[in-house]
Amino acid sequence: MAMSTWILIASVLAGLNVLFLGALSFVWLRNYRQFKSPLVAGLLAFGVVMLIENAAAIYFFFSMGMLYSGSLHAQQFVAVLRGLQFVALAFLTYVTMQ
């Protein structure tokens, strides 16, 4: 079964989110090693958990396409949620890298 356009868009956005989260987690790990701050530890935990969640989403998008195949609205909603997450992570990555 071919992947729908909306799920493909969601997969690409999840992949970009993984890249942002990888960069953020790297910076936060480096900062945690230097400062040992609980706030930075929390940011690092957030980054790692979100990275795992996005990687799992990519896996399920490719392995369980039928999960969303019955509803175009569900596919669009998943793509919009990944898009919103992408925008939030883009802002967070920009601010963190400054």
Image (tube, rainbow, N blue to C red):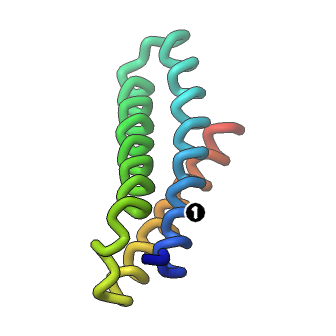
Number of marks present in the image shown: 1
- Residue appearing at x 60%, y 45% in the figure: 19
The residue positioned 49% from the left and 68% from the top of the image is 10
Examine the rendered structure and indicate whether residue 28 appears above or below residue 65: above
| Residue 67 against residue 23 in the figure, above or below | below
Q: Position of residue 76 (x, y in %)?
A: 42, 83
Residue occupying the point 48% across, 75% down = 3
Q: Residue furthest front?
A: 1
Q: Nearer the viewer, residue 55 or 20?
A: 55
Which residue carries the number 1 mark? Answer: 12
Place of residue 42 in the rendered image (x, y in percent of width and height, measured from the top left): 36, 30
Q: Amino acid at mark 1?
A: Val
On the rendered image, what quadrant is the N terminus found in?
bottom left
Residue drawn at (48%, 77%) of the image: 2
Where residue 44 appears, x then y in whole percent?
A: 43, 30
The image quadrant of residue 15 is bottom right
Vertical arrangement, residue 41 with respect to residue 73, above or below: above
Q: Position of residue 82 (x, y in %)?
A: 46, 66
Question: Which quadrant of the structure image shows residue 9?
Answer: bottom right
Q: Quadrant of the C terminus?
A: top right
Label 1 CA crowd tier, 10 Å (few <14, some 14–19, many 20+):
some
- Position of residue 97 relative to residue 80, above or below, is above
Q: Is residue 17 left or right of residue 53?
A: right
Please give left or right for residue 29 compared with residue 53 in the image.
Answer: right
Local secondary structure at mark 1: helix
Which of 75 and 60 lies nearest the eye of the viewer?
60
